[in-house]
């Protein structure tokens, strides 16, 4: 018995150090597992944020197009009122459609700009971060271009001041 107690006494600090080292390794393994889960969660959160921004960007582009359509409708109404007030001269080859053709072309261009952005939410869910960032940039450029189209509309010039 003295031999066993002597052995324990001589190697107590070695055993305690070994036990502490084993606990530290277990704690480190648990911390690594938590860190990996946190990294996956952070990536998923970033991806969800990008999906939300992509959806918002598409909505902004659609809102810009609706605003363009409204401006086109207002411009057509102005031209219609102008044509009603100022009858075309007899024998004139000028057609009222010539005055409003640019409105239809601008509206068609806006619709064509919006078409490539038409993705469903499930399609957005399959994209990775780089593809989503590219899509977000495209939505911003498209919305800006559609907003610029409004400035290309030409209302009728006032004939009398």
Image (cartoon, rainbow, N blue to C red):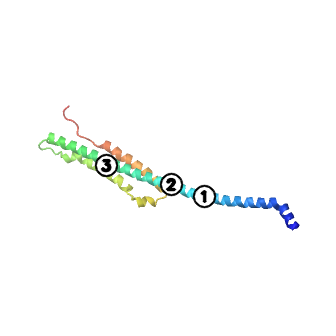
Residue 146 location, x and y as percent?
35, 47
For the residue pair 135 and 2, the one nearer the viewer reads as: 2
Residue 45 disc label: 2
Check if mark 2's residue and mark 1's residue have beta carbons within 8 Å.
no
Residue 66 disc label: 3
For the residue pair 1 and 31, the one nearer the viewer reads as: 1
Can residue 136 be seen? yes
Q: Going by the image, does 44 lie left or right of 159?
A: right
Residue for badge 1: 34
Residue 160 location, x and y as percent?
18, 33
Element at badge 2? Answer: helix
Residue 21 location, x and y as percent?
74, 59
Closer to the chain start, of discs 2 and 1, is 1
Q: Going by the image, does 160 lie left or right of 149?
A: left
For the residue pair 41 and 80, the one nearer the viewer reads as: 41
Q: Nearer the viewer, mark 1 or mark 3?
A: 1
Q: Going by the image, does 106 lie left or right of 58?
A: left
Closer to the chain start, of discs 3 and 2, is 2
At x 47%, y 56%, the residue is 131
Quadrant into which the C terminus falls: top left
At x 29%, y 50%, the residue is 107
Depicted 33 relative to depicted 78: above or below: below
């Amino acid at each position: 018995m003295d031999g066993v107690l002597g052995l324990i006494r001589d190697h107590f600090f070695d055993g305690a150090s070994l036990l502490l080292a084993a606990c530290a390794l277990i704690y480190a393994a648990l911390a690594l597992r938590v860190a990996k889960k946190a990294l996956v969660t952070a990536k998923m959160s970033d991806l969800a944020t990008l999906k939300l921004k992509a959806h918002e960007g598409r909505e902004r582009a659609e809102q810009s197009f609706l605003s363009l359509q409204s401006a086109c409708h207002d411009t057509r109404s102005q031209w219609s009122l102008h044509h009603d007030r100022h009858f075309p001269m007899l024998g004139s080859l000028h057609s009222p459609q010539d005055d409003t053709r640019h409105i239809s072309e601008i509206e068609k261009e806006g619709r064509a700009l919006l078409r490539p952005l038409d993705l469903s939410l499930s399609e957005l869910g399959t994209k990775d971060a780089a593809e989503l960032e590219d899509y977000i940039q495209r939505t911003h450029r498209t919305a800006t271009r559609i907003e610029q189209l409004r400035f290309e509309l030409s209302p009728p010039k006032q004939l009398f001041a």
